[in-house]
Image: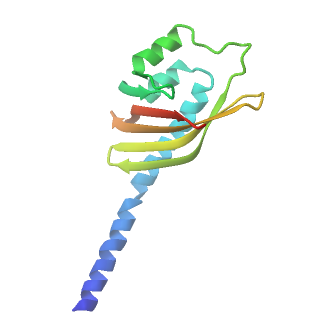
Amino acid sequence: MSCRITIFLITIIALTATACNSPDQEADKAEIRELLDRFLEGASTNDAEMHDRFWSDDLIYTSSAGERYGKSTIMEGMENGSQPDLDEPTPAYSAEEVQINLYGDTAVLAFKLVAETEADDRDEFWNTGTLVRQDGEWRTVAWQATKIP
């Protein structure tokens, strides 16, 4: 009897492990990673359309400076000419150490944001975002940025 129980428990554990990394979850993780990469590319050029696509209308954003605001503030900044100063080096953004945890139609995204300029300046930030699938698309509803000293 104990052998049957052991086999049953091993089967349950194996099925659970398989479900945790189902093809659907892997596809969702790949979709979120692609969205992140497209967003960072767009953020490098202040692409307002990409910002509009990435952020949910009910976004809560906490900046590395400790300020909290929403999508409307981000979009207003884009509209009011927060384009990069051509005399200032424009950073290129990328993500390192990306981790994506899925919880159904909710995902937690954590990564190291790297901002590099042509002058070899490099700033790093820990970023954590919560994304929710809304109308079939992943949208960011919460974001926290912390500058790495």
Q: Position of residue 31 (x, y in %)?
A: 48, 43
The x, y position of residue 90, in whole percent, is 69, 22
Furthest residue toward front: 149
Looking at the rendered image, the quarter that the C terminus falls into is: top right
Numbered marks: total: 0
- Residue at 72% x, 28% y is 117
Report the front residue among 137 and 93.
93
Q: How did the renderer colour the structure?
A: rainbow
The vertical placement of 128 against 49, above or below, is below
Quarter of the rendering containing residue 124: top right
Position of residue 97 relative to residue 51, above or below, is below
Q: Image check: 107 left or right of 125?
A: left
- Judged from this view, the residue extending furthest toward the left is 1
The x, y position of residue 101, in whole percent, is 41, 50
Q: Residue at x 53, y 40 (%)?
A: 34
Residue 136 seen in this snapshot? no
Left or right: residue 134 versus residue 98 is left
Question: Could you tell me if residue 13 is visible in this image?
Answer: yes
Outermost residue on the right side: it is 119
Kindly indicate the quadrant of the structure image that contains residue 137: top left
Q: Is residue 45 above or below residue 147?
A: above
**Quadrant where the image shows the N terminus:** bottom left
Instruction: Judge left or right: residue 60 versus residue 123.
Output: left
The location of residue 85, given as percent across then percent down, is: 68, 12
At 57% from the left and 12% from the top, the residue drawn is: 82
